[in-house]
Image (spheres, rainbow, N blue to C red):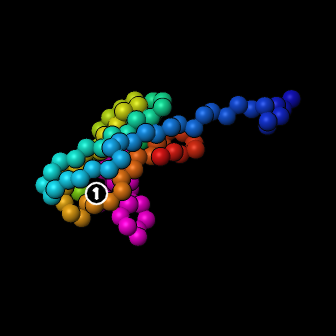
Amino acid sequence: WEAPSSKILQPDPIVMTQNPESVTVSPGDTVTMYCKASQSLSSALAWYQQKPGQSPQLLIHSASSRQTGTPARFSGSGSGTDYTLTITGILTEDAAVYSCQQHYSYPLTQ
């Protein structure tokens, strides 16, 4: 017996909420960005940086592991539903859009 595909329940996508929406800082400042998930991610959380005209670059995966080439001034932390990205001693070159993405379940969501 095979259940009709229309009757198979699909899990609700995980909703990600990020704040602040924007921040103004000066070189040398420390800035922290926050990301909250609608359910526990078991640390399956990545942070991306996207500069104007460029593709997104992976900075952090698994909540706190820096991708090869990510400067040490970027650090990630968190667990469960709450995560942070901190830039310590921010540089002008760090001006970009930062986004979190869960890689706990499909569909991947930001």
According to the image, label 1 marks what residue?
70
Query: Where 93 falls versus 26 (above or below)?
Result: below
Residue 50 seen in render: yes
Residue 44 seen in render: no
Q: Residue drawn at (40%, 68%), measured in percent from left and top? A: 54
59 in magenta: yes
Q: Can you name the residue that lies furthest to the right here?
A: 1
Image: magenta residue range: 47-69
Name the image quarter holding residue 97.
Answer: bottom left
100 sits left or right of 23 in the view: right
Q: Nearer the viewer, residue 23 or 55?
A: 23
Q: Residue drawn at (40%, 46%), measured in percent from left and top? A: 100
Q: Amino acid at mark 1?
A: Thr
Q: Quadrant of the N terminus?
A: top right
Q: Residue drawn at (43%, 39%), measured in percent from left and top? A: 17
Query: Where 97 falls versus 33 (above or below)?
Result: below
